[in-house]
Image: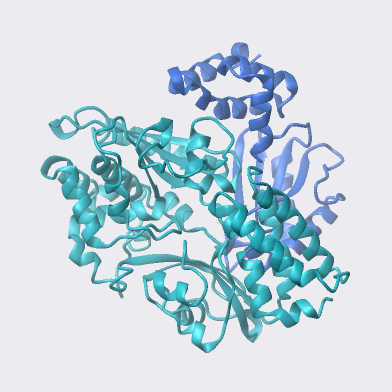
Chain colours: A blue, B cyan
Amino acid sequence: MLTENYSAEVEAILARHPGDQKEAATLPLLYLAQKAYGYLSLDALIEVGALVGQTPAEVASLAGFYSLFRLHPGGRRRVQICTDLPCALRGADKFAEELCANLHIRLGETTADGEFTVEAVTCLAGCRNAPLFQVQDADGIHYYEGTPEQPLTVDAVIGILDKLRL
Amino acid sequence: MTEYILLRHRDIPHLDQLEVYLQHGGFEAFKKVVTTQTPQQVIDNIKASGLRGRGGAGFPTGVKWSLLTKNVFPRYVVANADESEPGAFKDREILENNPYQFLEGVMIASYAAQANLAFNYLRGEFADLAAKLEANVAELRAHGWLGENLFGTSYSLEIRNHLGAGAYICGEESALLESIEGHRGQPRPKPPFPADKGLYQKPTVINNTETLTNLPLIVARGPAWFRTMGTASSPGVKIFSLSGSVNRPGNYELPLGTTFRELIEKHGGGAPGGRKVKGFIPSGASSPVLPATDEILDCPMDYESVAQKGSGLGSASVIVFDESVDVVWLAVKIARFFKHESCGKCTPCRVGMRLMLEMLERLYGGEGQPDDLRQIERLGAIIQRGSLCGLGQAAPNAILSSLRHFRSEFEAHL
């Protein structure tokens, strides 16, 4: 339970959104629940709903709307590669494909060891440094990108992922 | 060598450290307005500068502030740092490297709007950045630049960073407000406008990150100084995010009115491999495509001139594509983005973009039907006219304009 294992965080979030602004605590609490459980199960949605006075259906409609929330278990880390137009013009589709081949999966799948789920996502506001990706895990979200002069290579990314595995 | 106005960290190393920002006049502009000017004087100054919103709409900032419903409080200021438009990456550079100038801008806007609480809404992917900005805000509080009775006056101000969770639509101002309140980011019908009934139904000013970052220097140096840059109707500098088929993609801070040719050829170094630039999208995925003819390349990048050419300057996120790019592939990419990012509220956008994507994918796969091009035009018009907010109204822009300017490439797929 969040109220037991993350009581200080829950209190801080609720204190920041008092009174009639209580609903505004929903997104921060969903982030916390996802950090705690890895994904947002029905139980997690019920728990967050109880904290902010919303029905599980209302909370689920939020969790389903925002793309950073996951409603199903997957790899321990989500590797999210931008394949939108500006990145694709600089080879992002091929990059994603080669990375997946290297990990013996297809885009959207999880590696055999359960470590990484590789996904294509929309623009990450780093178009000049394409290709780029973010890793979303229990620690939060971190960007990985090269520069226009030295863009990320698939080999370099495999190295990054190997380090994350440790 | 002219100085940077917004990307000042490129001139001044470590500008993201408070003591460095202070050494370069940091927070003097904020102190000046709070201790020597009325809110109305600040609004008049910004109006006189001619600053226009840098998020895309180009609406005069001072005018926007003056539309706040009189005598209704509390009021809120919201900084829109939801930068999610494909091709846009300027606000991120400001927030990462010049955060205090941005925050000082938020503070000046808050004083002008007589708001005691400001929100900085960041896209969820900027979580690391939000943590850094929280630390910046805590520092300002510790120094007495945020909090109660600032500089011994009766004015008080707090800034709260607020994270989204992955939704392009939250850059639309009313959807952004819904998101802060803890709801799905779906736009509200207008009117009422946020200046009347915004966050928690109170008068609210929403400004883009880059717009706000302009404010400290305008206050410090005056509106006449600001008007020495840019054009008469589009004064000042702008950050142009240049991406796609160019040798040197990046953020270029240039006076408004600089030509596309200078940006793409001189700064961007043209297309890779000596290829020819075929066209570009001046303002990210939501603006109409322009072909790279001499006439278009020589067009000055200001709000009116780009509109006259049938597109828009918007956030100035210039995506370039060269002669090796299949325009139908480009249209598929754009359709996929908007199909994914439609918030689902309006049927023409939600269902329309799905149908649009299916049709374009079929065409790109070589299975187009003879009637497809007419259907794309018809569907695009329905989506544009039948959607409540700017997302739906703009979603078909790049697709329809691609078809208009490069029809033979579409026909080649039939």
Q: Residue furthest top?
A: A4
**Residue B14 appears in the rendering:** no
Q: Is residue B107 above or below residue B83?
A: above
Viewer-side residue, B69 vs A61:
B69
Task: Check the picture and name the quadrant holding the N terminus of chain B.
Answer: bottom left
- Residue at horizontal 51%, vertical 51%? B83
Task: Give the image quarter of residue B380.
Answer: bottom right
Q: Position of residue A78 (x, y in %)?
A: 72, 41
Left/right of residue B355 with respect to residue B49 in the rendered view: right
Task: Give the image quarter of residue B262.
Answer: bottom left
Q: Position of residue A106 (x, y in %)?
A: 85, 51
Task: Check the picture and name the quadrant holding the C terminus of chain B.
Answer: bottom right
Left/right of residue B180 with respect to residue A45 in the rendered view: left
Number of marks drawn: 0
Viewer-side residue, A139 vs A108:
A108
Q: Residue furthest left?
A: B36
- Residue at horizontal 29%, vertical 40%? B110
Viewer-side residue, B200 vs B5:
B200
Q: Position of residue A30 (x, y in %)?
A: 61, 27
**Residue A93 appears in the rendering:** yes
- Residue at horizontal 46%, vertical 41%? B121
Q: Position of residue B147 (x, y in %)?
A: 26, 29
Left/right of residue A164 with respect to residue B165 in the rendered view: right
Task: Give the image quarter of residue B201.
Answer: top left
- Residue at horizontal 83%, vertical 50%? A103
